[in-house]
Every structure is written in structure tokens, then in C-alpha cells.
Amino acid sequence: SEPESRRTAVVPDPPRHRTWIVSSTPEPDAHGQDLPAIVAKAMEGDTIKLRPGVYSGGFTIARGLKIVGETPTGPNLTCIQAVEREVMTIRAKGVSLENVQILQHANTTGTGVSIAGEAEVEMTHCVVQAGGTVGIDLTGAAVLRASKSQFTGSIGFSLRADHQSRVELTECEFTDSISAMKLAGGARAELRGCKFMRTGINDGYAIHAVRDGTRALGL
């Protein structure tokens, strides 16, 4: 047999992350039009690129994925929407959302985006507009890091954090909300350069922090 000193360890190739292209209309270079189906197929570390258009939500992200809209501003926006249900539920670390508008059509109780467990989400240049009672709901040890994004909760909270979850917001805006943010259960929030406009309406709050170890720090 080969001497021990001459044996070479075989290092496996790193996994190849795939980029999926999703279009709201049939296009020859796209992998499909059904965003929930592509999310279900994508593997850890994959990127999903969305062409401008409107896509159906109602899906769960259970792996670390990056979902990116092609255009951050302008008339050709990328929108993910749902009616009377959550637009998306996130249960994984390493999730990134960029250049997307998340829209929940509802006038009843409900959540736009649920981030739970030990999920960690980064959000950049996004808009979350919820017609239900909560725009983004964090529970467990979930973490949200958002920058240059906008949050609106027309009949309730734009963002609610509970159960030791953590929120880090940089240059974000809260608009047209009865209460922009609620913190409870020891949740923590750190805000840098954020704006609150037309929030706390109808006897609501800009930031509602329950005294149970909850902390909100503004910089």
C-alpha cells in the first residue's frame, strides 16, 4: 500500500450555489413564473432573481436563500403579495431580501411576514405594507437586520418583536401606522437614522415597549 507520508487528502469541492430567474411573464431564460414553487426547489445558499412584476406569496422559506428584485426603485417594481394570509414565513438563518415590495391585502387580523425560531433575515431596499394587524412579526430568537427599507401597518403594528428577538434598523422609515413598533418579551431594537412619519395615529404609539427587559436604542 501507499506510504502514509505520500497519501494526499481529498478535499471535496465546495457546493455550487444556483441562481434562479423568475419572471411574471413567460420568458425563455427564466426558470418559471411560480415563485412559491421555485422557493421550494431552491437549496441552501441559492439566489432567486425576480424580474419586475407581481408574484404570489403564501410560502415558507426554510433554507438560507437570497431573493433579489432587479430594480430597487421606479415604476417597474417587484412585488410579492398575498390576500388574507401571510405573504411569507421565514424559519431559516442566512435569508436575504433585496429590492422587493411585500404587500399583504387584508383588513382583518393577520401578519405580512413571520420571522420565527432562530431565523436571521437581512432586508435592504424593501417595502413592507400590511393591511393586517402586524406587518413583520418576530418571535423566538429571530433576528432582523434591515437598511433603507420602509414599513407600513395601516390598522396595527408595522413591526412587532417578542420572545428575546432582536431588530437592527438603519435608515429605515415607518409611515402611516397606528403603532409603528411594539417590543415585548425581552426583545431588543437598535435604530440608526430611522424616521417615523404619520405614526401613532388614533391614540397609537411610535414605539410601544413593554417593561419586561425589553430595550429600544436609537442612534
Image (cartoon, rainbow, N blue to C red):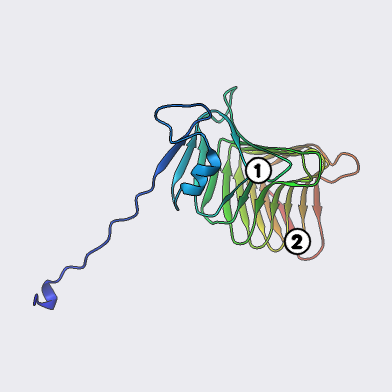
Q: For mark 1, give the secondary structure.
A: loop
Q: Distance between the Cα atoms at labels 2 and 1?
A: 27 Å
Residue 106: x and y in percent read: 77, 39
Please tell me which residue lies in front, 156 or 48: 48
Point out the tag, 2 or 1, that comes first from the N-terminus. Answer: 1
In the picture, the disc for residue 213 is none
- Going 76% across and 47% down the picture, which residue do you hit? 110
Residue 156: x and y in percent read: 81, 44
Disc 2 marks which amino acid?
Answer: Thr
Please tell me which residue lies in front, 119 or 171: 119
Give the quarter of the image for residue 112. top right
Residue 199: x and y in percent read: 81, 39
Please tell me which residue lies in front, 71 or 170: 71
Answer left or right for 94 relative to 115: left
Of circles 2 and 1, the one toward us is 1
Q: Is residue 160 above or below residue 5?
A: above
Disc 1 marks which amino acid?
Answer: Val
Neighbor class of circle 2 (other Cα within 10 Å; few <14, some 14-19, many 20+) is: many
Say which quadrant the N terminus sits in: bottom left
- Going 59% across and 34% down the picture, which residue do you hit? 55
- Going 90% across and 40% down the picture, which residue do you hit? 202
Q: For mark 2, give the secondary structure.
A: loop
In the picture, the disc for residue 87 is 1
The outermost residue toward the top is: 75
Q: Is residue 140 above or below residue 147?
A: below
Which residue is tagged 2?
A: 214
Answer left or right for 7 relative to 159: left
Residue 179: x and y in percent read: 81, 45
